[in-house]
Image (cartoon, grey):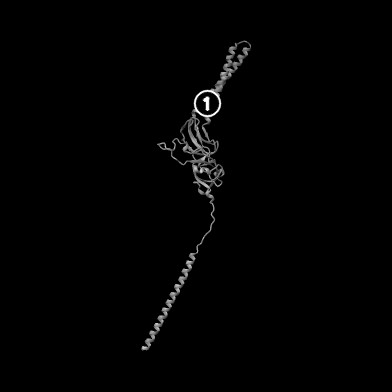
C-alpha cells in the first residue's frame, strides 16, 4: 500500500514537471515571436517614404485679382418735352425696349387746342397774303398806265411783303405746335432696359421733367479699382478674366484693359484728405481701370449695371 502511494505521487510529480516545462517553452516561443514582430515593425518604420517634386510657377499667380463693378457706356434720361398728363405706360421698370419704341403717352389737350388755333390763324394769313398779292399786281398794272402814283404802288407791294412774312410766322407756329404734339409720345433713343420711372399715370408733367431712364445692357464695361502700386503692372490691352457674383465661378467673362480713369476719387473730392490742423494724411489711392467685355458673352449671360465683379488681370507679359 505504501509502495502504491509512492508510485502515484511520483507519476504526479513527473506530470507536473512536464506541464511546467511546456508552459515555459510556450512562453519562450511567444516572447521570441513577439520580439521578431517588433523588430520587423521597427525596421519598417525606420524606412522613410520621400516624394520628389519639381517646383513650378502657378499660372494663376501671374495676375492681379481685384474687385469691380459693371458700368454702362451710355445711360439716357427720358424727358417730357411738352405739358400734359401721363395717360399710359407702354414700358415699365425692367422691360427691354428697342430703338424708337413708344414708352409712354402724354395727354396734352392745351397743345391740341393751340395747334387748332394756329392752323386757323395760318389759313387767315394765307388769305390776307393772297388778297395783298392780287392788289399789288393790280396797282403795278395801273402804275404802268400812270393811273396811280408810284408811292401808292409801293405801299401795296410793302403790304404784300408784310402779309407774306406774317403767313410764314403763322406756319412756323403751326410746325412748332405740331412738334410739341408729337412729343406726347415718348420713344426710346436706343435699345436697352428701363431702369427707373419717376412719374405715375395721371400725373402732370412739364417740359424738362425726367420720366424714366434707359440703360443699354448690350454694351457694358467693368471698373476695376487698382491700388497705386499695382498700376505699374497694368497696361492697355492686357487680357482679363472676370467672374460675377450673379453667376459665380461657373461663368467666366473675358475682356481687355481699355484705359485708365483721369484721376482718383480723392482728386475730385470737395474736401481734401487732411485733418483740421492742416497736416497731410497719406492715403493709398485706388484708380478705376476700365475693362471691356465680350458682347457675345454678354448676350449669353446678361449682366446689369452695378453688379459686383472679380477681375483677374493677366500680368505674365510684364
Q: Residues within 10 Å of mark 1 (few under 14, many from 20)?
A: some
Location of residue 166 with respect to 269 vertically, above or below: above
User: Residue 156 location, x and y as percent?
Assistant: 58, 15
Check the image and name the residue furthest to the right.
145
The residue under the point 51% across, 26% down is: 114
Is residue 227 visible in the rendered image? The answer is: no
| Quarter placement of the C terminus | top right
Q: As rendered, which of 117 and 81 lies closer to the eye?
A: 81
User: Residue 133 location, x and y as percent?
Assistant: 59, 18
Is residue 172 visible in the rendered image? The answer is: yes
Residue on which disc 1 sits: 116
User: Residue 85 location, x and y as percent?
Assistant: 47, 32
The residue under the point 53% across, 27% down is: 176
| Quarter placement of the N terminus | bottom left
Location of residue 124 with respect to 12 vertically, above or below: above
Q: As rendered, which of 49 and 164 lies closer to the eye?
A: 49
User: Residue 71 location, x and y as percent?
Assistant: 51, 40
Amino acid at each position: 500500500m505504501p509502495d502504491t502511494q509512492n508510485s502515484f505521487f511520483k507519476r504526479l510529480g513527473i506530470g507536473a514537471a512536464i506541464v511546467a516545462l511546456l508552459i515555459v517553452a510556450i512562453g519562450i516561443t511567444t516572447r521570441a515571436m513577439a520580439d521578431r514582430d517588433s523588430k520587423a515593425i521597427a525596421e519598417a518604420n525606420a524606412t522613410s517614404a520621400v516624394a520628389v517634386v519639381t517646383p513650378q510657377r502657378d499660372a494663376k499667380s501671374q495676375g492681379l485679382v481685384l474687385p469691380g463693378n459693371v458700368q454702362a457706356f451710355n445711360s439716357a434720361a427720358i424727358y417730357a418735352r411738352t405739358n400734359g398728363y401721363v395717360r399710359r405706360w407702354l414700358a415699365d421698370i425692367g422691360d427691354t425696349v428697342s430703338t424708337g419704341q413708344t414708352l409712354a403717352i402724354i395727354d396734352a389737350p392745351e397743345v391740341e387746342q393751340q395747334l387748332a388755333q394756329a392752323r386757323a390763324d395760318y389759313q387767315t394769313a394765307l388769305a390776307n397774303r393772297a388778297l395783298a398779292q392780287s392788289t399789288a399786281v393790280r396797282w403795278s398794272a395801273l402804275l404802268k398806265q400812270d393811273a396811280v402814283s408810284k408811292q401808292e404802288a409801293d405801299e401795296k407791294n410793302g403790304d404784300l411783303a408784310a402779309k407774306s412774312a406774317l403767313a410764314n410766322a403763322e406756319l412756323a407756329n403751326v410746325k412748332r405746335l405740331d412738334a410739341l404734339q408729337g412729343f406726347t409720345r415718348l420713344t426710346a433713343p436706343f435699345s436697352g432696359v428701363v431702369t427707373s420711372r419717376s412719374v405715375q399715370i395721371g400725373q402732370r408733367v412739364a417740359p424738362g421733367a425726367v420720366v424714366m431712364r434707359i440703360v443699354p445692357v448690350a454694351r457694358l464695361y467693368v471698373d476695376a479699382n487698382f491700388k497705386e502700386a499695382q498700376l505699374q503692372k497694368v497696361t492697355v490691352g492686357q487680357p482679363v478674366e472676370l467672374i460675377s457674383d450673379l453667376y459665380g465661378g461657373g461663368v467666366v467673362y473675358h475682356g481687355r484693359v481699355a484705359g485708365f480713369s483721369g484721376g482718383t476719387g480723392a482728386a475730385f473730392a470737395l474736401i481734401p484728405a487732411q485733418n483740421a490742423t492742416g497736416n497731410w494724411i497719406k492715403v493709398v489711392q485706388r484708380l478705376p481701370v476700365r475693362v471691356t467685355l465680350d458682347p457675345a458673352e454678354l448676350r449669353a449671360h446678361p449682366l446689369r449695371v452695378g453688379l459686383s465683379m472679380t477681375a483677374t488681370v493677366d500680368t505674365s507679359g510684364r
